[in-house]
Every structure is written in C-alpha cells, then in structure tokens.
Amino acid sequence: MARTVLTVLGVVLAIWLVFAFIIPALFATLKFLLMFAIIAFLVVAAITLMGKMSR
C-alpha cells in the first residue's frame, strides 16, 4: 500500500515539476533567443544598408 501511495506521489510530483518549471523555462529560453535573433538581424541589416549607401 505504501509503495503504491509513494509511486502515485512520485508521478504527481514529476508532472508538477514538468508543468511548473521545465515548460516555462523552455518558453522563456525560446523567447529570449527569438528576441536576440531579431535584434541581431536588425543590426546586421542596418550595417549592410549603411555599407551599401556609403558607396
């Protein structure tokens, strides 16, 4: 009986850990990388345009 209760408790804890910490951390990381990529693209585009206009 105790083994079953501890197994169910472990499964509930694992599901809570995934939904409370891992999924939000993944979304935060992806959001940060997306913003970083957009800023990098804008910088590269601005430098390219400046380089082509100065000729």
Image (tube, rainbow, N blue to C red):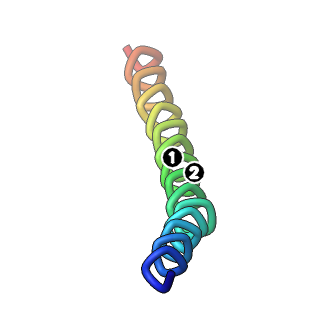
Count of labels in the image: 2
Q: Residues within 10 Å of mark 1 (few under 14, many from 20)?
A: few
Judged from the image, the secondary structure of the residue bearing numbered disc 2 is: helix
- Which x, y percent locates residue 20? 62, 68
Residue sitting nearer the eye, 32 or 27: 27
- Residue found 50% across the figure and 61% down from its top: 22
Q: Where is residue 18 in the image (x, y as percent from the top left)?
A: 53, 61
Please state, as top left, top right, bottom left or bottom right, where the C terminus lies in the image.
Answer: top left
Residue 27's disc number? 2
Secondary element at image label 1:
helix
- Residue 22: which disc? none
Instruction: Give the CA distance from mark 1 to mark 2.
Output: 5 Å
Residue at 54% over, 70% down:
8
Extreme-front residue of the structure? 1
Q: Is residue 21 above or below residue 48?
A: below
| Image spot of residue 35 (x, y percent) | 56, 45
Which residue type carries mark 2?
Phe
Residue 46 to residue 53: above or below: below
Q: Image point 60% across, 68% down: which residue?
A: 16
Disc 1 marks a residue whose amino acid type is Leu
User: Disc 1 marks which residue?
Assistant: 30
Image location (x, y in percent) of residue 52: 41, 15
**Of 53 and 49, which appears nearest the observer?**
49
How many residues crowd around disc 2 within 10 Å: few (fewer than 14), some, or many (20 or more)? few
Residue lying at the far bottom in this picture: please name it: 2
In the foreground, 12 or 20:
12
User: Along the line of sight, which residue is nearer the eye, 41 or 29?
Assistant: 29
User: Where 47 sits versus 15, above or below?
Assistant: above
Whether the residues at callouts 1 and 2 have beta carbons within 8 Å, the answer is yes
For the point 46% across and 38% down, which residue is it?
Answer: 37
